Amino acid sequence: MNIAILGATGSIGLQTIDAVRSCISDAKITVLSGYKNMAALAPLVDEFKPEMVWVPDDEAITNLTELTNHPCEILTGESGLIACAAESKAQVVVNALVGRAGLAPTLAAISAGKNIALANKETLVTAGELVMSRAREKNIRITPIDSEHSAIWQCLNGSQERDIEKIILTASGGPFRGWRREKIAAATAKDALRHPNWDMGAKITIDSATLMNKGLELIEAMWLFAQPLENIEIIVHPQSIIHSMVQYKDGSILAQMGLPDMRLPILYALTAPKRTQTTFPRLDFLKCGALTFEPPNLKNFPCLALAIHAAKTGGTLPAVMNYLNEWAVAQYLHNKISFYDISEIMDKAFGIYKIKPVTSLADIHEAEGWAESFVSKI
Ligand code: NDP
Ligand code: MG
């Protein structure tokens, strides 16, 4: 199997490398990309000897070539990333990029006829309708890496759509679950970066603290599984053992469980329907303690309420929300704004933005342009 890994130096990228290295003996990695972390990219280039590598600019090329011995084609810029997503030898593209940067490569991979193992949920939040319809036209398989969506996919296991009553999307609740609102208001990015169950990149860790991550995942699930909003229920399950569930029309519920380890959904996204032998730690029911469930607190976590509104409204609103959230999270990470400013910014923008239907990529770009100009005035 020839695999292109976009975002190889990140949390999902490195776990993909780990899973591929230890479990898929016939894998050849043909493309690798990094962004800031050339020290992490260089050893991967030397180990896997890809055909193509992507870095953002010429300075990064200089930094990378000082650290590696493998001569390969190194591309830069957005067009370079698109070329990497379409690289001729790869059969599957792992999209482990973070944020809006993931959309153009997803579309390029679809156009080039590559299957996609998708971690970059922002792709579907921004342009779910376009992405899914183009994938259908080209007969492309988009397999989810996000643990909840992998769980849902595994529970669905090819079931008839008419038999599904609802999807139960589980959420850990993040590091501020159960905190008082005043305490959350004062929480810094450092506090938010301490996730109880998962070790992830900075953006998704903040998204997990605001519960925006669950909002993004709600929209991701609607597109991936062609389900209406009312068929998806969000339930907080702090232990992150049940990764999500599907309830069928006879009342039967299937759950997918396991220890929180992203290598499992990554492997399954690459090899399904085949199961791979692994030596990853196993869940022991006699040791894992009680599994508990509670409703999400929309008052303390208004980002989730905003995302539910965007999911219900549709059109270009989710793209605007995604842009604003990414911007606000970056500001929060730099201690420029407070926790509740993230939702405030989106709330203000939602009040004045004129939503349009999405008929083409240009509509998405226009919506993101509006969001860009909105934040430039803050
Ligand atoms: P990271 O921040 O750890 O990694 C992001 C990767 O993308 C890195 O390789 C980074 O390079 C690169 N990158 C960052 N910005 C750009 C850019 N503008 N252009 C091109 N490349 C860029 O993120 P995660 O791995 O945590 O998340 C990746 C995606 O997977 C996200 O969409 C996230 O929501 C999703 N996801 C992540 C999970 C997790 O456990 N981490 C779980 C489920 C979903 P560099 O590091 O060199 O700067
Ligand atoms: Mg998830």
Image: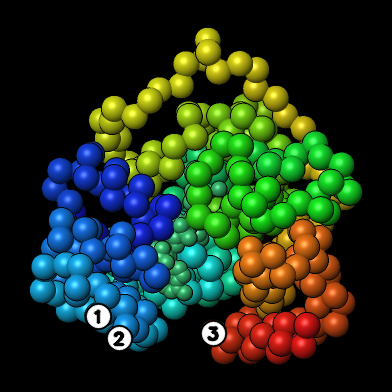
Q: Which of 245 and 103 is in front in this view?
A: 103
- Gap in Å between the C-alphas at discs 2 and 1? 6 Å
Please indicate whether residue 376 sits to the left or right of residue 122 in the image: right
Q: Residue at x 81, y 49 (%)?
A: 184
Circles 3, 1 touching at the beta carbon (< 8 Å):
no
Q: Which of 143 and 6 is in front in this view?
A: 6
Can you tell which quarter of the image residue 362 is in?
bottom right
Q: Residue at x 74, y 43 (%)?
A: 176
Answer with mark 3 or mark 1, whichever residue precedes in sequence.
Answer: 1
Residue ID for mark 1: 62
Q: Is mark 1 on a helix, strand or loop?
A: helix
Query: In the image, is residue 65 above or below residue 339?
Result: below
User: What amino acid is at disc 3?
Assistant: Leu
User: What amino acid is at disc 1?
Assistant: Thr
Measured as percent of width and height from the top left, residue 373 is found at: 71, 89
User: What amino acid is at disc 2?
Assistant: Asp
Q: Which mark is residue 361?
A: 3
For marks 3 and 1, give the one nearer the viewer.
1
Can you tell which quarter of the image residue 203 is in?
bottom right
Count how many numbered circles sit on residues in the image: 3
Q: Which residue is drawn at 36% across and 47% down?
A: 15
Query: In the image, is residue 140 above or below residue 273?
Result: below
Please indicate whether residue 276 sits to the left or right of residue 283 in the image: left
Q: Is mark 2 within 8 Å of ligand 1?
A: no
Measured as percent of width and height from the top left, residue 247 is found at: 63, 35
- Gap in Å between the C-alphas at discs 3 and 1? 34 Å
Measured as percent of width and height from the top left, residue 273 is found at: 32, 41
- Gap in Å between the C-alphas at discs 2 and 3? 29 Å
Residue ID for mark 2: 58
Asked whether the viewer can see residue 243, the reply is yes
Q: How is the image coloured?
A: rainbow
